[in-house]
Image (cartoon, helix red, strand yellow):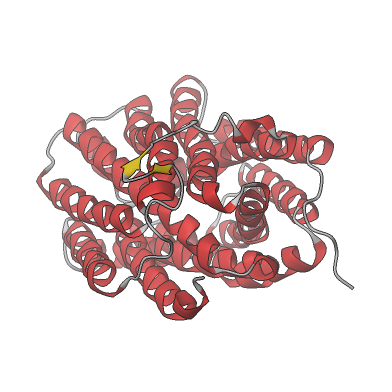
Amino acid sequence: MVSSIEKGSTFILNLSIFSVMLGLGFIAPLLPIYATSLGASGFEVGVIFAAFAVVRAATMIPFGSLSDIFGRKFFIVLGMGVYVLASIIYILSRTILQLIFCRILHGIASALVVPAAMAYVADVSPEDRRGEAMGLFNTALFAGIGFGPLLGGILADKLSFHAPFYMCAFLASIGLVLDTFKLRESRKQGFSGVIGDTKIIKISYGFYLLRDKNMLSIVFSRIVTSVGFSALLAFFPLIGFKLGLGMSEVGLLLTVQALALIIFQKKFGKLSDKYGRKNLMVLGSIIGGVSLTLLTFTKNFLDFLIILVFFGLAGGITAPAYSAAIADLSGRERFGEAMGLFLTAMSIGMALGPIMGGIIADFTSLVNIFYVTALLTFIGAFILIFMFKETVKPKP
């Protein structure tokens, strides 16, 4: 049904996702510094980061479900427009509450775009190449996030602190233009839930899907493993600055971590198509937990570099396998809802990580954040080991 539009439309979608995520990556390492310059405590830094994830968690499933009914493109384009608006408001923010409001808008934008975009990829990819297709999509997504911190740090060092925020707004505008004029719809609107000319909107908020034990194990595993990733993004810049690293060096380290994640996406996506999802999800989670543990012993740039490469490798192993497993477990008419559920699980973890990390930092120390998040990541691996039953038969 959609094979004729697969290559061209997925290229446009991946390019627009890359552009908007690159802009978000520009400002990621600057937000904790921006917030502390406004007098934010560790807890308040956590709240600023968590606001994005909390809003995503509340809205991703409804928006994903609605994209199953009304089509993907409308939600992708609308979300890109909200990205542009949020990026502009960042530039005007002068208080902690204003920064929180910006993060809320960015959370809404992400909830509109990402589940619909992931469902779009599932719509147009053959089942036996789903892991590879998800790997390519994740490559675009994480490439933007990954290269952004380095380029954002350079812009801040060489031009001005606000330069990355202006560039964020510009790149979001590029994504909006591409999707508005070049992206083709991947499915018929009203494909489900239609009686005559009336659309019957039914949103289960993922409860129907959670009756499946495999789906339940993925959701709980992804929640706890996402805590470590979000805590790393929120508090690693503060650890780096405490040890004397500059903004460009912190940006470089986060970029290298993301680059490692990016490089392995397609390869491990193919391996999940061939050998199954479970082993890769478990292996990546274990590597991630070990990497977070080793961060607590690190004192110099080179050690940080090596450990963050392994942390990126962990994400490169798990991300396409998780995404493909979610699509395997949901019917084609529920791709949007399933992707919304999966991303909501990630958002819950992304919300808990900064808040938990902020409390730990305020009452103990920054390094203890990574002991706790490493333990949670190992728990995520054990959930999959004991609960998840493989969805793909190994190929000869």
Task: Say how many tags the image has.
Answer: 0
As drawn, the residue found furthest toward the front would be 196
Which residue reaches farthest right?
Answer: 396
Taking the image as drawn, is residue 109 in sight? yes
Q: Nearer the viewer, residue 315 or 219?
A: 219
Is any part of residue 241 visible from this angle? no
Q: Is residue 236 above or below residue 280?
A: above
Out of 15 and 389, give the one closest to the viewer: 389
Residue 155 vs residue 7, the one in the foreground: 7
Q: Is residue 97 above or below residue 78?
A: above
Provide residue 142's location: percent of width, then percent of height.
Answer: 47, 62
- Residue 378, x across and y down, in percent: 73, 38
Tell me which residue sits at (38%, 67%) in the image.
18
Q: What's the residue at 52%, 68% (across, down)?
A: 124
Query: Between residues 163 and 23, which one lies in front from this camera angle?
Result: 23
Q: Residue at x 44, y 72 (%)?
A: 10
Left or right: 233 as drawn, with respect to 288: left
- How far across and down, in percent of the image, does residue 242 sit? 42, 44
Where is residue 171? Give x, y as percent: 24, 66
Residue 274 in which image quadrant: bottom right
Determine whether, in the image, residue 23 is placed left or right of residue 160: right
For the point 54% across and 33% down, which residue is it?
206
Residue lying at the far top of the rendered structure = 363
- Quarter of the rendering occupied by the C terminus: bottom right
